[in-house]
Amino acid sequence: MRSLLDLGLISLSVLAVLAACLLGSTPMAPGRVLVALFGGGVPGDQTIIWSIRMPRALTAWLVGAALGASGAALQGLLRNPLAEPGVLGVSATSALLATVTLYYGLTPYGAWVLPLAAVIGALIATTLIAVLAIRTQSVVTLILVGVALSAFAGALMALMLNLAPNPFTLADMVNWTLGSVANRSIEDIVRVLPFLIAGLAILWLSRRGLSALTLGEEAAAGIGLDLKRQRIAVVVGAGLATGAAVSLAGAIGFVGIVAPHLVRPWVDSDPARTVLPSALLGGVMLVIADIGVRLIPTGSELKLGVVAALIGAPIFAWIAAQARPGRG
């Protein structure tokens, strides 16, 4: 069942990315898209596919995968179905540092400035949480500190929006806080890929410890699990992956919390087996949401974070309504 689920989600990922290349404001027949994908056809088709649609689709998939895997790992670590990257304040702190670069007009100094600021913000948050994870044995304390950190970062972002020096800066900051993958390039992806790969690799390598934690912390420690090392690994992995995601697309919510809930019934609620399918499903969800962004007829393009929340919130409410006492 697990292999079939993974294969099915991989196939859906490929189909979603191809659909994202096919659909858009300029109609293109499937044959033209396939020819352009392999470097053939007219130059205009290659430009549309490789400079606009494919980078945008890949960005959406990678961001969704990072958030899905991070949400699954954090829910397994904290044994809390509400956990996601935003709960520990990683997303908000990452977005805060990115917003600071826009507020002070630092982005013209280099293409690395904004993504690097977002990753640094995520690392600051993960460092704080990692230090706390070493000093405390309580996951409740970790969650409470994460909520406080997220609220503080959100308040600082609201303050900068309130004090924006001009309407253009305000518009840039609002667009960033609402989330978008428009106008992303392959170069943008390459810049954050090392952080993304490192984060996902750490989460993948620490997945077996998540299964041990389902027995309880004392029992997990009794069978040889290093609790502090496990917490630090998951927090740092989620921080790197989330920071890379925020640096690519800004603040995107609900993917990290919805994707793990949707795949959990298919993997017998085993946290170790939830990480990969959650990443794949998160990627598919965000590519489909971005296709919706481009196809919904509006005066100005909707933001991906808005559409993701509009889709994710009702789904999560439905999942919560179906939950039974005693079920994760």
Image (tube, grey):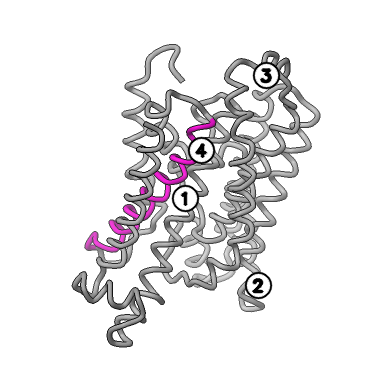
Mark positioned earlier in the residue sequence (3 or 4): 3
Q: Position of residue 147 (x, y in %)?
A: 61, 35
Which class describes the residues within 10 Å of circle 4: few (<14), some (14-19), or many (20+)?
many
Marks 2/3: CA–CA distance: 47 Å
Residue 153 lies, with reference to residue 266, above or below; the image says below
Left or right of 81, for residue 93: right
Q: CA distance from mark 2 to mark 4?
A: 36 Å
What amino acid is labelled 2 in the image? Leu
User: Percent from the top left, x then y, of residue 219?
Assistant: 67, 14
Query: Could you tell me if the residues under marks 2 and 4 are in contact, i.e. CB atoms within 8 Å?
Result: no
Residues at marks 4 and 1, CA–CA distance in whole angstroms: 19 Å
**Dot 1: element:** loop
Task: State yes or no: discs 2 and 3 in contact (Cβ < 8 Å).
Answer: no
Q: Using the image as rendered, state which of residue 322 and residue 5 is in the foreground.
A: 5
N-term-proximal mark, 2 vs 4: 2
Residue labelled with disc 1 = 252
Q: Nearer the viewer, mark 2 or mark 4?
A: 4
Reading the image, the residue beneath label 3 is 220
Residue 290 drawn in magenta: yes
Q: Which residue is mark 4?
A: 275
Helix, strand or loop for disc 3? helix
Q: Which mark is residue 106?
A: 2
* Sequence-first disc among 4 and 1: 1
**CB atoms of marks 4 and 1 within 8 Å:** no
Q: Judge whether residue 92 can be spotted in this image.
A: no
User: Mark 1 or mark 2, which is nearer to you?
Assistant: 1
Task: Report the magenta residues as a range.
Answer: 272-297
Q: Which of 257 and 260 lies nearest the eye of the viewer?
A: 260
The answer to whether residue 110 is magenta is: no
Q: Main secondary structure of the magenta part?
A: helix
Q: Position of residue 13 (x, y in %)?
A: 36, 52
